[in-house]
Image (cartoon, rainbow, N blue to C red):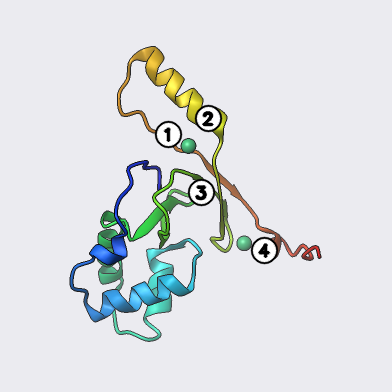
Amino acid sequence: MSYQDRRSPDPLRRRRRTTPRQRALLELLKRDNHFRSAQQWHAELRTTVGVGLTSVYRILHQFAEQHVVETQRAEDGELLYRLRDTAEHYHNLLCRICGRAERFTLDALEHHTEHVARQYRYADVNHHLDLYGTCPDCAGVAQQE
Ligand SMILES: [Zn+2]
Ligand SMILES: [Zn+2]
C-alpha cells in the first residue's frame, strides 16, 4: 500500500532515537527486500533478539507511519511489510509464496483514475491494484541465460 504521491524526505535520516529492537529489525529489513508478515519478521528477528510478536507489530506500525517500511496486502488480506526505498507511486506484482515483488505502473490506470475523479468531481481519489502470482524461482522454472 505504497500508493502515495507525496514526496517525503528520506525517512531513515529523520528518524528519532531508536531502540536496539528497532535497530535489529531495521537491519533485518535492509538485508531482505521480500514482503513478509509481522509473524514472519518476528520469527526471523527472535533468532537474534529477544522480542515479542506484539513489539514487532508495534515497531512495524511505527515504521509504516514514518514511511520507513511500505505495506502491501497479501492475497488473504494480511498486511505485509518491507523496507521502503522510494516515494514514487507504483503497484506490486507479488509472489504469493516468497513475498518477492516486482514494481510496475500502468499509465492507462493512472490517467483513467484522474478522468473518473474529474468526471464525478471527487477529490483525493486513490486507487489500489494488486497482482499476485508465483515467481519463477518458486515455480521451479529454470532461469534463462
Ligand atoms: Zn517466489
Ligand atoms: Zn497507480
Query: Residue 58 appears at what percent x and percent y?
Result: 25, 64
Q: Which residue sits at x=40%, y=85%?
A: 47
Residue 62 visible in this rendered orientation of the protein: yes
Disc 4 versus disc 3: distance between alpha carbons? 16 Å
Task: Name the residue beneath numbered marker 1.
Answer: 127
Which corner quadrant of the image does residue 10 belong to? bottom left
State whether label 2 is within 8 Å of ligand 2. yes
Q: Earlier in the sequence, mark 2 or mark 4?
A: 2
Please say if the residues under marks 1 and 2 sit with CB atoms less than 8 Å apart: yes
Q: Which quarter is ligand 1 in?
A: bottom right
Q: Position of 142 compared to 50: left or right?
A: right
Give the class, few, some or many, for how many residues have Cα within 10 Å of label 2's Cα (few <14, many ≥20).
few
Query: What secondary structure is marked by label 4?
Result: helix
State whether label 1 is within 8 Å of ligand 2. yes
Label placed on residue 138 = 4
Q: Nearer the viewer, mark 3 or mark 1?
A: 1
Q: Which residue sits at x=26%, y=57%?
A: 66
Check the image and report above or below for 141 versus 49.
Answer: above
Query: Residue 70 appears at what percent x and percent y?
Result: 39, 55
